[in-house]
Amino acid sequence: MSSDQSSPSDGSIPPVNLTPLLKALQTRDHEGLSKLRHALRTPLNQIIGYSELLMETAEETGTTSLIPELKRIHSGGAELLALINDALAAWKIEAGKVDFAALRENLRTPLSAVITLTSESLAKARTAGQAAIAKDLEKILLAAQNLLSLSENTAATEQVEPGSASPLDDTSSAIAALNAPPLHPGKVTPEDFGLSSQPMPNARILAVDDDAMNRDMLLRRLDKLGYDVTEAATGREALAKVKDGNFDLILLDILMPDLDGFQTLEFIKADPRHKHIPVIMLTALDDVDSTVRCIEAGAEDYVPKPFSPVILRARITATLEKKRLRDQEQAFLAQLQIERTKSERLLLNVLPKAIAERLKAGQRTIVDSFIDSTVLFADIVGFTRIAAKQSPQRTVQLLNEIFSSFDRIAEQHEVEKIKTIGDAYMMVSGVPIIRNDHAEVCAAAAFEILEAVRAFNRRHSLDWAIRVGMNSGPVVAGIIGTKKFAYDLWGDTVNIASRMESHGQPGHVQVSEVTKNLLSDKYDFQPMGVIDIKHSAPMPTYLLLQRKPAK
């Protein structure tokens, strides 16, 4: 891993202003307390984290000579963490009982032990030519020295009482070491310890932390777990990588320059494209208010530093498992929507859209009466003779082609197809959606049906002919059947429309007097005489001719 940070050429620590933190403590400011705890816990995170990594690596590689010292360093870090947590407990801030002098005294012995043990282990590693181990020990030593510098300066007063004065001179460099880079930045690879470098295919994780050593520890631990890890040093860099990458999880620090973790989290969750990515806050800022703020903003979890590797692994595993289940759920819902769309499309092939919606809403008995409608029948002349001349497959293929063209005409004119009966095609206008121009749109569809048959004959060199009949009036419409249901029409209007077709002439549209009266202002007609209608009086019929010129 590379770092953009570099040590000053003279080895000095860059100055950082501690004054605001001490002032915040004087006024018992909880935010100031949280930042001071964060500042003290950051080097502890590095002491504990690197010692854990070194012990794990020593066990894996059989390099056990330094394990006793590493265990003592790790225990020293844990002792220091307990002392700092106790000294800066929230109730002590509230009561004005933060005793920095006592904190300094309590830290001195275990911190000196950590520094001494680390220095001795570093000398052994260098002598043994263990370069990679020496690098990590240098980082532990630097972190311990940073903590020493910080604790000495934060203990500038014996005790902070609410509202009391405190000498704050020469504190500008107290937490400078927190910004110092590792002595030898650079990614430690498995080959340094004789391990395989083959990656384990797994989730993609973005690790965001402004501290180079924190990122190094985190990336190495995640690498050991087999994750594909990308790093980011700032909130803005993280947002850019989230935009360009496809991550399964984000580990996010809070206290960062420029754009802090709170803001970064809010930006991620505000973007619909990335809000589904789970975020675990991984930070030394461990106060309740920060935890609540992050969870309310959409964070999946909150893990304080120094973290237990076992707990971190468990949290990551649980979060990724939840994401996997959510992803499966979303995929299932997407597939369900696809299947629902298919079902609706199939339903609309059988039923009018308005009727399908009523069925989906739970209505089971659907029967409606319509006062004004126009029913159209179209029938192929001599279809029995046509079918006898060719194979059943060819007959069905041709019939499907011509009826498909009728379907397109019906859809174009918003006329409802009711059904096909053998070689007959039935449609209606004004049902189930009421419209005043039902006769006119049926007439336009009828002429297009005649033209579709002529085009069909030209394509296939055939001489098929079709009769079309139309009648207007009241109908009853509804659903019949419970499993293989269908939408159908009943009434004299339907029967008369069928007679108009069966008594008509091939290649023409024959209509009843009722339909003629509805269209007389727009079309010309040719009287065709009177026909007998079963169960009804004889009635005149008319051929529908061309449309009249617009006036």
Image: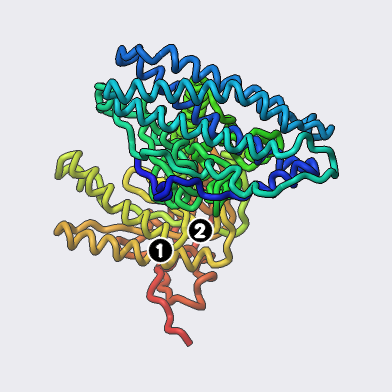
Q: Give the CA separation, mark 2 to mark 1.
A: 10 Å
Between 99 and 216, the one lying in front of the other is 99
- Can see residue 364? no
Count residues near mark 2 (Cα–Cα under 10 Å), then give few for <14, some for 14-19, many for 20+.
Answer: many
Residue 310, horizontal then vertical, whole percent: 49, 19
Residue 79 is at least partly visible in this image: yes
Crowd tier of the residue under label 1, counting other residues whose Cα lies within 10 Å: few below 14, some 14–19, many 20 or above: many
Looking at the rendered structure, the secondary structure element under dot 2 is strand
Numbered tag placed on residue 429 in the rendering: 2
- What amino acid is found at the position of numbered circle 1 in the picture? Ala
Which residue is rendered at x = 40% and y = 39% of the image? 183
Instruction: Tell me which residue sits at (30%, 15%) in the image.
Output: 61
104 relative to 95 in the view: left or right: left
Q: Which residue ends up furthest to the bottom in the rendered image?
A: 551
**Amino acid type, callout 2:** Ser
User: Is 161 on the left-hand or right-hand side of 351?
Assistant: right
Between residue 73 and residue 329, name the one nearer to us: 73
Identify whether 147 is placed above or below 510.
above
Counting from the top left corner in percent of width and height, residue 72 is at: 50, 15
Percent across and percent down for residue 68 are 43, 12
**Left or right position of 103 against 389:** right
The answer to whether mark 2 and mark 1 are in CB contact below 8 A is: yes
Label of residue 22 in the image: none
Residue 64 location (% of width, % of height): 35, 12
Residue behind mark 1: 445
> In the rendered structure, which disc, 2 or 1, sits on the residue that comes first in sequence?
2
Tell which of 437 and 247 is nearer to you: 247
Query: At 47% from the left edge and 50% from the top edge, which residue is drawn?
Result: 239
SS type, badge 1: helix
The quarter of the rendered structure image containing the N terminus is: top left
Could you say which is closer to the camera, residue 89 or residue 549?
A: 89
Report whether 156 appears left or right of 65.
Answer: right
